[in-house]
Image (tube, helix red, strand yellow):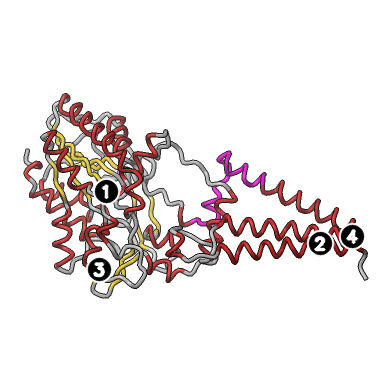
Amino acid sequence: MKPPSTARGLLAAVLLVAAAAAILVATRTTLAASGQHRLVFGMWRTRHVLAAAGLTWLGALVAVRALSVGAFERALCASLGVGLALVGLEATGRAVLVDWAGVFRPESTSKLSFQAVPHLDESGETTPDLALAWGLPVAPIAYRFRTDSHGFRNAIDRESATLYLVGDSYLVAGLLPFEETVTARVEAALRRPTMAVALSGLGPEEEIAVFEGAELDVEGALVVQFFFEGNDLSDSARWSVGITRTSPPARSGFLNSLIVSVQEATQPVEPFVDLRSGRLNGVQYAFRWVGADVFPHLDRLEPVLGALSAFRTRVESRGGRYAVVFLPSKLRVLGPLCEFTEGALYADVATQLSDLPQRLAEWARSEDIPLLDLTPALIASTRAGEVPWFQYDTHWNEIGHRVAARELVEWSAMEA
């Protein structure tokens, strides 16, 4: 028979483990109900798993203490050693000594123009962004990515142009050969020097800062800024608190990278993707940049429009012209034509869409700024059986770039 102190210790250990189990039972959720991008084993939020793991670890220590003081001391030393090792590993990431995200997910660290790297010439394979983020088993896409002396993706290295396309990853178009991009297509059709001034992950204000930092000559030129409804406002919110994409990237911490890897390795992929997808002519298309990504940042619209107006004034003061292109979200164009499975998060498409197109149009009219809304043309292409987006990516495929280029070429604002 165990001594009373031993029995009490083992009982305490059992209670701690039972509490850990109770946490997992009480907090188990579903992908649809959680609203999370990732769950551990597709059932628990990370904080609940960590709480249960902590209680289990504490219960194990209590049980060892009840059975043997010597074993407890060794277990405690081992625990402290592991804790110190984790602190050290985390510190290497925070100090930008090790990119732990790249260690755990080397395919996620492609240099496809989040920073301006002059004269970059990189070839390899990459993965559509949603397939990469959600662990979908899709074939990689071969790419060749070259930049000019400014660090922008252009085939010809120019000091200036007569047409500037200003934007983010939609213009960078890392999944496509450059000749299929809207930049190349517009230049070929109009026969006028055209330059993309774009980096991935920028918001409107940061796009302007990048353009002005390049010190490009705009006299006699047209500057066309692309506004994407999906994440331009959230990128503006990030920029407003001083977090930029053009500064050297911060390295990811060890613990966060480890947790993300565990989530990705344990979460069932199929139900996760089905909840965020619809089918168009039997083909699945996954969606991101929906209501939850847009609505919380609508208060950034007025500051963004103010920045666009001020940029327009500066362009015109230097002898140039300014115009804006509206890029609708994938869900706005494809969603109304899709079939959704029961319980899909975006089946009620109307609840996921903001009034950004109308508000942007009203602003453009009041400011007398030419505005091209690409929504009708992209919808018409989709209805005709030519879908402008990749299945598992948030960006246009070559059809989308072809449609956008055609609309730009025919747009009256493009006339010299």
- At a point 14% along the width and 43% down the height, the residue shown is 371
Where is residue 213? Give x, y as percent: 31, 30
Where is residue 224? Give x, y as percent: 18, 40
What residue occupies the far top of the structure in this picture?
A: 317
Q: Earlier in the sequence, mark 1 or mark 3?
A: 1
Side of 340 where 42 appears, left or right: right
The disc at residue 63 is 2
Near mark 3 (Cα within 10 A), the count class, few <14, some 14-19 or many ≥20, is: many
Q: In which quarter of the image is residue 33?
A: bottom left
- At a point 21% along the width and 40% down the height, the residue shown is 225
**Residue that badge 1 annotates:** 229
Near mark 4 (Cα within 10 A), the count class, few <14, some 14-19 or many ≥20, is: few
Q: Dot 4: what SS?
A: helix
Q: Dot 3: what SS?
A: loop
**Observer-nearest residue: 136 or 266?**
266
Q: Quadrant of residue 223?
A: top left
The disc at residue 5 is 4
Distance from label 1 to label 2 (Cα)? 56 Å
Distance from label 3 to label 2 (Cα)? 56 Å
- At a point 23% along the width and 46% down the height, the residue shown is 356
Where is residue 190? Give x, y as percent: 10, 46
**Residue that badge 3 annotates:** 338
Side of 243 where 289 appears, left or right: left
In the rendered image, the vertical position of residue 342 relative to residue 196, given as above or below: below
Q: Nearer the viewer, mark 4 or mark 1?
A: 4
Q: What range is drawn magenta here? A: 87-106
